[in-house]
Image: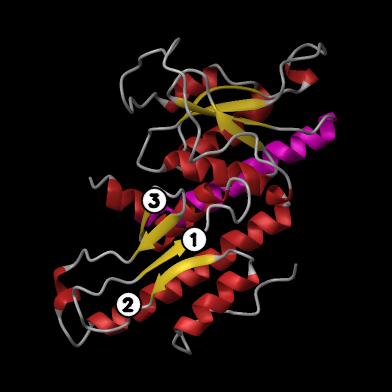
Amino acid sequence: MSESKTKVNNKEEISEAQVKELLEHWEVPCKDLNFAVDNDLDNIPYVVLDHDSYSGCEAHFFTVADLALWIPELLPSGDVVLYYPLRLLDDKHPDVLSRKRTISWEILGFHFDQIMHKIRVAGAHRFSSTDIWAHNEREPEGYIEIPENTPIPIDKILRRVDSSIRGTILELNKAGFATIESCSGLKKDHDGSKPFQPYVALDDEYYHDVSAHIFTIAEVSGWNPCWGAHGFDVLIYATDESEKELEKAWKKLGEVAKEFGEELESYRELVEPS
C-alpha cells in the first residue's frame, strides 16, 4: 500500500473526519473516538483501536502513543485506548486548551501514519508475530530474579559481544534499549563454525513501555521479537541466513534503534525524569 493520503501537517488543522480517514486508510478499525477539541476539562480526547486489526498491533499502538506523549492502555476487551494527557497547568487556560488538543491530535496522527507505513513496508503484519506482546501469559516457574533496571556499564557489555556487532549493540544501548546478551550468528565471529541463531536479549523493564518499543523496532527492522523465558527480557531474532544478509540485518537494526531512540527521547525524559 502506498503512503497515507491523509497527511497531517501544521498548515491545516486536523479534523475528526481526517483522524477517522487515517485509521481507515491503514485498515485499523476505530471502536470509539472522542475528538473533544474544546475547552472542557472533563471532556477528554481519546480513540479506541481494535486489537484484531492485525497480529501484534498492540505494541505498535503503544509505541505510537508514547511517541506522541499520549497515554495508552489495554482495555478488558483487549482493544487499545489512547488518551490525551492533561499534564501541564497551563492546559487549563481556556484560550489554549482547544488549540493544544488540536496540535496533540496532529502529532498523534503523524506518528500513527509513520509507524503504520514502516510496519507495512517491513511486511511485519502480513504474518503472525513470533509472540503476542499484549496477551502473552508467562509461566512463573524458572524465573531468575535480577535487580530491577540495574544499568550495566557499556564497556562491560561490549567485552562479551561478538566483534562484528559491537557497533549495533552500542547503538541499541545508547538509544535506551539495554542489552543483556547477544550472538552475531556470523561464522567469522566463531572461527568458521556454525554459531547460534543471531539474537539479542534486551531488558524488558528498563523503562516504562520499553517492551512495546522493542517489539516495534524489531518488526520494523525485519527481526522476530518474542518474550524471553527468564521473566525480564525480550528476545529478538534475525531470520536471514547468508553472512551478507545477516550483516545487513544487524546494520538495519542499529539504524532503526538509533532513529527510534532519538524520537522517544522526550518520552523517556517524561517517564524517567532526572
What amino acid is labelled 1 in the image?
A: Leu
Task: Look at the numbered disc 2 and give the secondary structure of its residue.
Answer: helix
Residue under label 2: 101
Principal SS element in the magenta part? helix
Tell me, for residue 144, which label it has, or none.
none
Whether residue 13 appears in magenta in the rendering, the answer is no
Tell me, for residue 49, which label it has, or none.
1
Task: Look at the numbered disc 1 and give the secondary structure of its residue.
Answer: strand
Mark closest to the chain's N terminus, 1 or 3: 1
Q: Which residues are magenta?
A: 242-266
Marks 1, 2: nearer the viewer: 1
Tell me, for residue 75, which label it has, or none.
3
Q: What residue is rendered at 61% in x and 41% in y?
A: 218
Quarter occupied by residue 36: bottom left
Mark closest to the chain's N terminus, 1 or 2: 1
Q: Residues within 10 Å of mark 3 (few under 14, many from 20)?
A: few
Give the CA separation, mark 2 to mark 3.
23 Å
Q: What residue is rendered at 52% in x and 19% in y?
A: 229
What amino acid is labelled 2 in the image?
A: Arg
Whether residue 250 appears in magenta in the rendering, the answer is yes
Give the CA separation, mark 1 to mark 2.
19 Å
Give the CA separation, mark 1 to mark 3.
10 Å
Q: What residue is rendered at 48% in x and 43% in y?
A: 212
